[in-house]
């Protein structure tokens, strides 16, 4: 059974020493006879950074992950650890790390802390984003704290208390009172269920956050292919709905698209679903939908020429699409990729 663990951007902002992305990058690099320095030069990072990336101690962003897959001539899925074709020491190391963190959670009371924070936040009518911003954290870091899956430093605890307009002592006392009153048991059980789902292959994805939504906000999925490799978007008919990623719930007009085009090669699984943010600015390194008409879209890898002008690339066959200034408003950014 495939055990691709945890999406990359869901863990964005975690401490560097935490395992972020258990991967097979080193194996594929060695199969190509490629030295670490070549991969480091390709990503524009140090040898030390490559070593941490290959060991799963340093995160990769979406653009870097795609660059690695392109350089190693493999799909994104090939880079994930799975029990069928991964080295057993890598699989076992990740399982041991998961077990270690589970024991830490139990002994440190992180599940109780996370459940208490969620209970208090909900009662105050605050969103995850509002608390994260006021606590000077990324959304993914604070979300993991509420899920009971991340240790909290004294400074972070102080910042969280400040976001709730209280003190650390009062916040701890309130959580202890909630626990004593049995008010956190349902939240802890709910968080445990969601965490198991996030470790299931069906929910592994590349993007900014988990598609498990705090309030189960659903978004429509569109898209059918044509003979030219375009994706036809007919907003009158959606094929299904999926949960909106947590970090996009405050935005408008978020939608999803089936990957029904192979014009980006084998980088992405044909089962992938693309989460689209039409309001986000598109830049070099992004993947985006270009609306050639109201319904006809082209899935493109966005690049920048020597003059700083953006253009789009797609393959099978190779095609470069140049943009005018007005065309830039027709680009919708792919914010999350569900494999």
Image: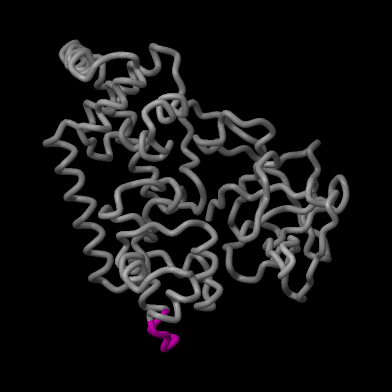
Whether residue 159 is in magenta: the answer is: no
Residue 32 forms part of the magenta stretch = yes
Question: Residue 90: x, y in percent?
Answer: 27, 68
Residue located farthest toward the front when viewing the structure as drawn? 307
Residue drawn at x 34%, y 29% as measured from the top left: 190
In the drawing, does residue 89 fall left or right of residue 339? left
Q: Where is residue 119, by image quadrant? A: top left
Which residue is pictured at 85% across the width and 56% down the height? 324
Q: Nearer the viewer, residue 39 or 262?
A: 39
In the shown orientation, is residue 245 left or right of residue 152?
A: right
Coloration mode: one colour
Whether 202 is drawn above or below 236: the answer is: below
> Residue 209: image x %, image y %?
47, 43
Position above or below: 54 against 238: below
Question: Farthest residue toward the left?
Answer: 107
At x 54% / y 65%, what residue is drawn?
Answer: 66
Span shown in magenta: 29-35
* Numbered label tally: 0
For this orientation, the residue located farthest to the right is 293
Whole-percent x, y for residue 109 in the image: 16, 31
Decide if residue 198 is on the left or right side of residue 295: left
- Quadrant for the N terminus in the image: bottom left
Residue under the image location 62 percent in, 31 percent down: 251
Q: How far from the left and from the top, in percent, is residue 305?
A: 72, 68
Query: Quarter of the image holding residue 158?
Result: top left
Between 60 and 102, which is closer to the camera in this rendering? Answer: 60
Q: Is residue 73 above or below residue 335?
A: below
């Amino acid at each position: 059974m495939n055990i691709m663990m945890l999406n990359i951007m869901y863990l964005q902002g975690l401490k560097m020493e935490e395992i972020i992305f258990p991967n097979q990058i080193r194996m594929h690099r060695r199969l190509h006879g490629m030295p670490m320095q070549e991969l480091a030069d390709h990503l524009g990072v140090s040898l030390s950074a490559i070593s941490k990336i290959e060991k799963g101690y340093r995160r990769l962003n979406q653009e870097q992950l795609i660059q690695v897959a392109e350089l190693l001539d493999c799909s994104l899925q090939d880079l994930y650890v799975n029990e069928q074709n991964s080295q057993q020491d890598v699989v076992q190391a990740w399982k041991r790390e998961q077990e270690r963190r589970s024991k830490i959670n139990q002994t440190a009371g992180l599940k109780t802390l996370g459940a208490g924070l969620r209970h208090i936040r909900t009662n105050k009518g605050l969103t995850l984003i509002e608390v994260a911003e006021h606590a000077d954290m990324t959304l993914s870091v604070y979300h993991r704290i509420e899920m009971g899956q991340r240790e909290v430093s004294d400074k972070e605890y102080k910042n969280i208390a400040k976001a709730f307009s209280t003190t650390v002592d009062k916040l701890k006392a309130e959580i202890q009172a909630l626990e004593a009153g049995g008010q956190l048991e349902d939240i802890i059980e709910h968080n445990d269920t969601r965490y198991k789902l996030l470790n299931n292959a069906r929910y592994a994805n590349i993007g900014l956050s988990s598609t498990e939504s705090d309030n189960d906000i659903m978004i429509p999925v569109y898209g059918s292919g044509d003979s030219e490799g375009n994706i036809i978007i007919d907003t009158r008919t959606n094929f299904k709905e999926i949960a909106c990623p947590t970090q996009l719930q405050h935005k408008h007009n978020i939608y999803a698209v089936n990957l029904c085009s192979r014009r980006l090669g084998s980088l992405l699984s044909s089962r992938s679903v693309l989460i689209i943010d039409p309001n986000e600015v598109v830049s070099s390194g992004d993947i985006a939908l270009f609306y050639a008409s109201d319904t006809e879209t082209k899935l493109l890898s966005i690049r920048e020429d020597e003059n700083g002008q953006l253009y789009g690339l797609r393959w099978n066959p190779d095609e470069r699409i140049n943009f005018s200034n007005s065309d830039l408003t027709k680009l919708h950014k792919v914010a999350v990729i569900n494999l």
